[in-house]
Structures are given as C-alpha cells and as structure tokens.
Image: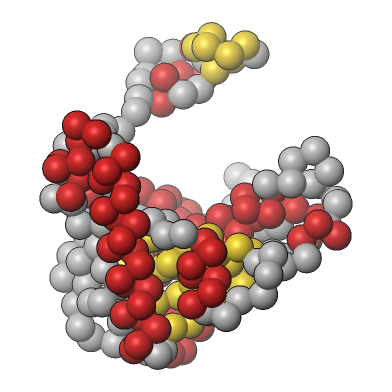
C-alpha cells in the first residue's frame, strides 16, 4: 500500500466528483451561504500555476444591475454565435446556455493584468496563464460538486465588453462567468450530450502511443 494515498472512501469521493461534475444551466432560487462560496474560492486559489504566478482573479457580482447587463450581453453573443453556426443555428438557439439570472451567485474569473512580466514556464507558451486559471476553475467546480452545489461556466461573451462592465484594468482578461447555485438535480450526463449536440469520445480515440494517431494499446488493450 502506498503510504501517501488517501483512504479508499476518500479516493472514491475524488473520482466521484470528477465523474459527476456537470456544467449546470438550471438553478433553484435558494442562496449559497457566503462561507460555502468562500470555501470554493479557496479551493480554486489552491490550484497549481505555471511559475507560481497565480494569475486568477475573482469578481463576485452582487449588483443586480450589473448582473442584468452581463446577462444581456451574453444573450447578444448567443445570437451572434447562432448566426455563425449556419445550419445548426436553430438547434443551438433551443439550448439553454446560461443560468445568470436564476443562479444564487455570479463570479467573473479573470486573468490578471501585467502578465508579460511572468516568464517562468511561459517564454514559448504564454497561454499557460490561461491553463493555470482553468485549473483554478476546475478546483472550484469539483469542490462545489462535492458539496452538492451546481456550477455553470459561461464563455459566450466579448472579453472587452465584460472588462468594461466590470471596470477591470487594461490588460486583464475575463475568462469565465461562473453561475453558482443550488440545483434540483444534477444532469445524468453532460447536457450537450443528452441534447444530442455532440457525444462523448471514446478514450481510444484520444490516447496515443509515441506517435500522433498511434493507438495506445499498451494501456488500453481492447478497452475503449
């Protein structure tokens, strides 16, 4: 037995949170206690970051007028996205893509300004600041799922518009609008899968061995 591993029930809890995490769009009106929300943000702040730059910033939206402005902008972008989808536009417009007005909390997760000074780990891949912030969001998401709270990641917005609405400094970059709240139930499978938008890929299609496109039979064998 590995002396560093968690007890089996705790390990299973981690994997269960990963399996049952969902991008939620339907919320109940009940509030999320502030101390609970803070736990999720602290979990996010414990994420790994390239060069230890910790590029994430969190804006809690408590102003009803600002929340409405964010909602209206997302709706505008939703219409623009539908226009870019061509034949799938009508199908797309039937999807529920956000829960901004119905969720208990809205957070803007953004990348800090002045990121060009962070070179460690970013000289050839400057986008690693976004990867780091994405890890923080995933931490938030899994912590919330473990406590039975739904989270939806809304990315359908123009960063310049959100930056202006939230009075963010030049050079900062909004990455996500997180809708957080109580839910009646978690989706049995990802919503875009159950709605027929796309399907879950078999792992055998995504895992390669040494060379791009060469199936990793040494790990998977006949398992898909």
In the image, 110: left or right of 127? left
Residue at the image point whose x is 46% and y is 59% from the top: 158
- Of residues 73 and 128, which is closer to you in this image? 73
- Of residues 7 and 37, which is closer to you in this image? 37
- Of residues 161 and 7, which is closer to you in this image? 161
Q: Quadrant of the C terminus?
A: top left
Q: Is residue 13 visible?
A: no
Q: Quadrant of the N terminus?
A: top right
Placement of 88 over or under 212, stated as above or below: below
- Of residues 189 and 169, which is closer to you in this image? 169
Residue at the image point whose x is 54% and y is 64% from the top: 160
What colour scheme governs how the chains and residues are painted in the rendered image of this protein?
Answer: secondary structure
In the image, 33: left or right of 193? right
Q: Is residue 76 visible?
A: yes
Residue 174, percent from left and from top? 55, 64
Residue 126, percent from left and from top? 74, 46
Query: How many tags in the picture?
Result: 0
Residue at the image point whose x is 42% and y is 19% from the top: 205
Give the quadrant of residue 97. bottom left
Placement of 8 over or under 193, stated as above or below: below
Residue 87, percent from left and from top? 19, 32
In the image, 139: left or right of 24? right
Give the quadrant of residue 74. bottom left
Give the quadrant of residue 134. bottom right
Residue 117, percent from left and from top? 85, 60
Placement of 83 over or under 57, stated as above or below: above
Residue at the image point whose x is 62% and y is 53% from the top: 130
């Amino acid at each position: 037995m590995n002396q560093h591993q968690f007890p089996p029930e705790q390990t299973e809890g981690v994997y269960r949170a990963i399996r049952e995490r969902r991008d939620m769009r339907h919320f109940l009106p009940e509030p999320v206690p502030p101390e609970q929300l803070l736990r999720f943000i602290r979990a996010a702040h414990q994420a790994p970051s390239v060069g230890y730059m910790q590029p994430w910033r969190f804006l809690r939206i408590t102003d009803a007028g600002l929340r409405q402005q964010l909602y209206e902008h997302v709706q505008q972008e939703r219409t623009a996205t539908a226009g870019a989808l061509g034949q799938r536009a009508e199908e797309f417009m039937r999807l529920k893509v956000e829960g901004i007005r119905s969720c208990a909390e809205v957070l803007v997760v953004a990348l800090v300004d002045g990121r060009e000074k962070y070179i460690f780990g970013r000289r050839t891949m400057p986008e690693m600041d976004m990867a780091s912030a994405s890890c923080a969001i995933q931490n938030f998401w899994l912590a919330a799922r473990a406590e039975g709270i739904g989270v939806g990641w809304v990315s359908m917005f123009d960063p310049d518009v959100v930056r202006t609405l939230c009075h963010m400094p030049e050079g900062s970059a909004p990455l996500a609008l997180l809708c957080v709240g109580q839910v009646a139930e978690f989706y049995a499978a990802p919503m875009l899968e159950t709605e027929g938008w796309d399907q879950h890929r078999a792992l055998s299609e995504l895992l390669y061995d040494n060379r791009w496109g060469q199936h990793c039979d040494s790990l998977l064998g006949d398992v898909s």
